[in-house]
Amino acid sequence: MTDSGSSSSTSTPLTSLSTSSGSLGLNIQKLTDPVSEVPHDEFWIFGYGSLIFKPPPGVERAEPGYITGFVRRFWQMSHDHRGVPDAPGRVVTLVEREYYWSRLAERDPHAKYEKKECRTYGVAYKIIPSQVPEVSAALDLREQNGYSVHLVPVHASSGSVILAIVYIGTPDNHAFAGVEADLDKLSELIYKSKGPSGYNKEYLLKLGEALRQLHDTNGVMEEDYHVEDLMARVRKLEALDVNK
Ligand code: BEZ
């Protein structure tokens, strides 16, 4: 039984949740209703994007850590937060390693900087059990633009492995932009885009700074070259912009 006192499905042991292969070669489980599929007393959310610098509500504990088997890329369109429907910005999504190396990496100028294991660093948040339904509903609303929810093992800096839900914009979602092969164009798009949540460049720079902070406090973390390079390019555009 969970603190929510709700349905029997919440008592499913997390370890019994199987992995599945989807049509995109995804080897991780997709959840359709995390609130009923994941026990509320072990409800963790892994943040690798805005959740790093803007944590979800109802956090009981936060643990920095990494997941393996994905690359983080600014390849998801944002029509609702960092852009608008006619001029979408770009935010991060995760691309599964297998799919990435088999179909997309060849056109990605940053592919040569990816290590074999493909670690993505972020923060795992344990949600206060009684607040799981509201927090999950709030995040579903906040991240509704093409993201689906999956279950991943997180290697926490404390040494433990935590099963957490993660929001991923898979390559079949309507807002997936595909490979952004032209980095000048991508950085210009991020530099100029703006949406209801603010400037797209602010999202990029906050994410980059938060990743650097994670690096500083957890020494072993590797640099995310994709994010670092885009930050450098956007800062250069800013410095050259006479109209700012
Ligand atoms: C995040 O992990 O910060 C996140 C990324 C994409 C959608 C929702 C959350």
Image (cartoon, helix red, strand yellow):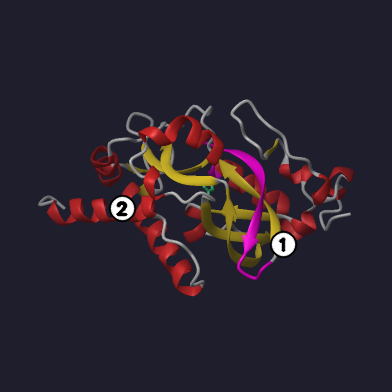
Residue 29, how many percent across, how many down? 70, 39
| Magenta highlight range | 142-159
Please name the amino acid that badge 2 sits on.
Answer: Asp
Q: Quadrant of the N terminus?
A: bottom right
| 240 over 156 or under it: above or below | above
Image side of residue 10 versus residue 73, left or right: right
Q: Is mark 1 within 8 Å of ligand 1?
A: no
Please name the amino acid that badge 1 sits on.
Answer: Ile
Mark-to-mark CA distance, 2 and 1: 36 Å
Depth check, front residue: 166 or 153: 153
| Residue receiving disc 1 | 128
Q: Residue at x 47, y 60 (%)?
A: 53
N-terminal of the pair, mark 2 or mark 1, is 1
| Residue receiving disc 2 | 229
Query: Which structural element holds mark 1?
Result: loop
Residue 32 tag number: none
